[in-house]
Amino acid sequence: MSDKQPSRRSLTPALLAALHGALWIVFWGMIFQQVGSFQKIFIDFDVELPVMTAWAITLANCLHGYWYLILPVMAALWVGDLVVVYALYQRPKLAVLKWLWLIAMFLLPLGAIAWIVVALWIPLISLTQSLS
C-alpha cells in the first residue's frame, strides 16, 4: 500500500499541469476559431464594437501573424508550470503557496476564456436585438 502512495503523489503535479495546459488550449482555440468567425459577422452587419471586443479581435489578428510562436511559448510555460507545481508538492510547508498557485493557474485561463465569451457575445446580443 505504501508503494502506491508515492506514485500517486508524483502523478498529481503532472495531472494538474496538464489541466492548466488544457484550459489554455481551449482559450487559444477560441481565439483562433471563434473570434475570426464573429469578426466576419460584425463586419457584414457593420456593428459598432465595444472596446473589449475590439481588443479581442486585435489580439486574435496579432496572434494569427505569429501563430508559429504560440506552440513553443506555451510548451515552455507548461514545463515551467510543471516544475513549480512539482516543487511545491515536494515541500509540505508551502501548502498555502501551492494552493494559491493552483488557484491562480486555473483562474487565469478561465478568466481569459470568460473575457473572450463576453467580448464576443455583447455585440452579438445587440446585433440580434437590432435585427428583431
Image (tube, rainbow, N blue to C red):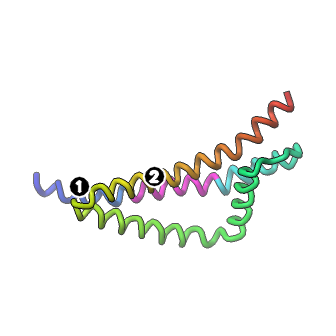
Please determine whether, in this image, residue 64 is positioned above or below residue 5: below
| Quadrant containing the C terminus in the rendered view | top right
Query: Neighbour class for label 1 at 10 Å: few (<14), some, many (≥20)?
Result: few
Amino acid bearing label 2: Phe
Q: Element under label 1? A: helix
In this image, 22 relative to 3: left or right? right
Q: Residue furthest top?
A: 132
For the stretch drawn in magenta, the main secondary structure is: helix
Name which residue lies at 22% across and 59% down.
Answer: 92
Q: Which residue is mark 1?
A: 8
Give the image location of residue 74, x and y in percent.
Answer: 52, 67
Evaluate if marks 1 and 2 touch, with contact meaning CB atoms under 8 Å apart: no
Q: Which residue is mark 2?
A: 106
Amino acid bearing label 1: Arg
Name which residue lies at 17% across and 54% down.
Answer: 5
Name which residue lies at 65% across and 68% down.
Answer: 67
